[in-house]
Amino acid sequence: MNKEKATVGHDPFEIEQREWKQRQSRERYKQLLTIASPIFILLLWEVLSRTGIMDIRFFPPPSAILGTFWKMIASGAIADHIGVSLYRIFLGFLAGVIPGVIIGLLMGLYSPIRHFVQPLVMALMPIPTLALLPIIIILFGIGDLSKVVTIAGSVFFPVVINTAAGVLNIDRIYLDVADNYGAGKLQFFFKIALPGALPVMLEGIQMGQAIALLTIVAAEMMGATSGIGYLIWTSYKAFLLKEMFVGLILISFFGYLFSLMLRGLQKKLLPWR
């Protein structure tokens, strides 16, 4: 009887099941912590505002901000701002990512291109794109195009640098295998370089989406007549702080949403990571 119990206790299937349940439990715990942290901050903010510890003139309680948000939705005042900002972010993000990936791959694959382009990238990267916004507005006007160009310029640099670094860090053995089997340039590009650079490249794209949100807010504050950044700036100037916080929370929400989407894409493309 004791031997049977010992055998059952050390059964590989039961051990695997137990380990799987433990992993699931740890994952649920991590998810709970992820949800708990923003809820805790909002509750703390609500309590401090309601008790007068925080000045509600400058920090209105989240419940009041939520009420303002619903009123803005009902009146349709916020839908246009959200739509315009998302349109600019999407176009600017693509306009920065696509050339960034292509040029980064070429820099990683071909030494002459890398030595030609790298000094330009290193020289231009430290210049904040927003510092060039007056020139961009002069060239492209105050419409959507200037915002798209500003976002694209901000997104381009982290993507191109990370993509080039990803290609250069590909294990030499994969390059040798491709040479030995006579892989053509297109095969090498799509079968070796692109998949090999993908982990680091996606990190650059992740950085790019965060920079895109930062850039759109600043760009819409300085030269726009619509958008979430415009809403934040005009609300601040009119001391409508509830409306201002609505804009800030919207940017935070979209940043978190885009980050989750890119992480989900990363899991699909890189399941081994």
Image (spheres, rainbow, N blue to C red):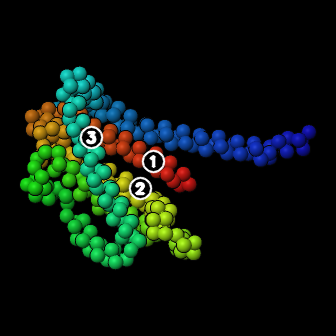
Answer whether residue 122 is visible to the viewer in this image.
no
Q: Quick one: quadrant of the N terminus?
A: top right
Q: Secondary structure at mark 3?
A: helix
Across and down, in percent, residue 194 comes to 45, 61
Q: Secondary structure at mark 2?
A: helix
Q: Residue at x 29, y 76 (%)?
A: 116
Q: Label 2 amino acid? A: Leu
Across and down, in percent, residue 86 comes to 27, 40
Query: To which quarter of the image does residue 108 belong?
Result: bottom left
Q: Which residue is mark 1?
A: 265
Disc number at residue 86?
A: 3
Q: Label 1 amino acid? A: Leu
Query: To which quarter of the image does residue 114 belong?
Result: bottom left
Between the C-alphas of marks 2 and 3, the distance is 21 Å
Which is more N-terminal, label 3 or label 2?
3
Q: Are marks 1 and 2 in contact (CB under 8 Å)?
A: yes
